[in-house]
Amino acid sequence: MLYILIAVITVLWAAGQSVLKAGLVESTPISSSIINGTCGLVAGLPFFYFNPPDFTDFTTFYPVSAWVALCYLTYYYALNIGELGAVSSLLNTFPLYTVLFAVFVMGEKLITRQWIAVALIIAGGVVISGNYINESDGGAVNDNSAGRGGDKNKAGYKRFILSFIVISAAVCIGIADAVTLPVVINKGPSTHLIYFWSTQIILGLFLKACFERKNFDFKKLVSKYSIIGNFLLNSGAVCFVLSMGYGQISIIEPLTSTYTLFVALIAWKYFGEKFTLIKTAAIITTVTGIIMILRW
């Protein structure tokens, strides 16, 4: 049953992330977060019916899920920049941070193969950061023109900032997924999902009122692609939380994160993103590391 869930999660997340990327053209990260919370509560209704939530000890467990929702806001900002294939690959290094958090904070242990996997993930991420994020700016620089050295420096700096933003989002998501486990274990997945998605709506509306008050537009909350993308992502999230009952988080995270390969293919097929040997090798190296970090 676990592997069936993982296969479903992989397909739903690959399709959802790709459609959401298209939706961010007409929406905003904050609006997409609100849409995500709304779609999540709708997608989760059948699951909530068969798995009733437990809202006791609200003050103990709600803050955890609310903090996780805040961390996941970085996901939408990260997805909104750079090429889909690059951003997806870097975002999906989050199992590295989940596993490292589990090792240094939760007391889990890694074997030699898994430490090698950590090195592969880092190496792949570095190559992607240097050669993939915002390639259009870097490619616009003429290496034969000494007068454009400043442009090259600016392009390099911009790639660094973009990579830093995406990797920071991956760190936040990885740690957030690790701390989700106590809520799921003690109160069940339905409780966490309701807390999480409700917070996305409440927090999102608050942030939208604060930061988008001059351009507050409810039309951005009805973006067709954002709604479809978030609905697919949240359907996968329901399966993901359900899968936590079948094994350690350090097993589930790496397997589900292989969906980045499908995202890369979609980005090539439908978004016109180019692939070079270096790009392909970097993605394969990263995904190999994610698979190797799995315990079996």
Image (cartoon, grey):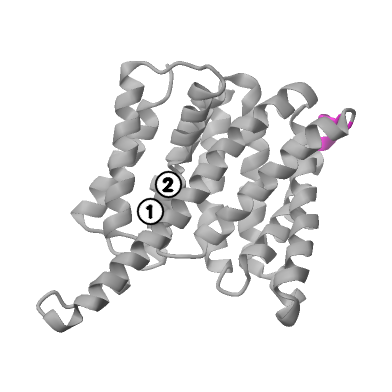
Q: Is residue 212 left or right of residue 174?
A: right
Q: Is residue 191 visible?
A: no
Q: x, y (%) of residue 247?
A: 58, 19
Q: Identify the main secondary structure in magenta.
A: loop
- Left or right: 257 with respect to 292? right
- Looking at the rendered structure, the secondary structure element under dot 1 is helix
Residue at the spot x=63%, y=26% of the render? Answer: 244
User: Label 2: how many residues lie within 10 Å, few (<14), some (14-19) or many (20+)?
Assistant: many
Give the camera-side residue of 214 and 11: 214
Quarter of the image with the C terminus in it:
top left
Magenta segment boundaries in residue numbering: 48-55
Find the residue positioned furthest to the right. 56
Residue at the disc numbered 2 = 260
Q: Position of residue 241 (x, y in %)?
A: 66, 33
Which residue occupies 27% across, 47% down? 282
Q: Is residue 193 magenta?
A: no
Q: Which numbered disc covers residue 264?
A: 1
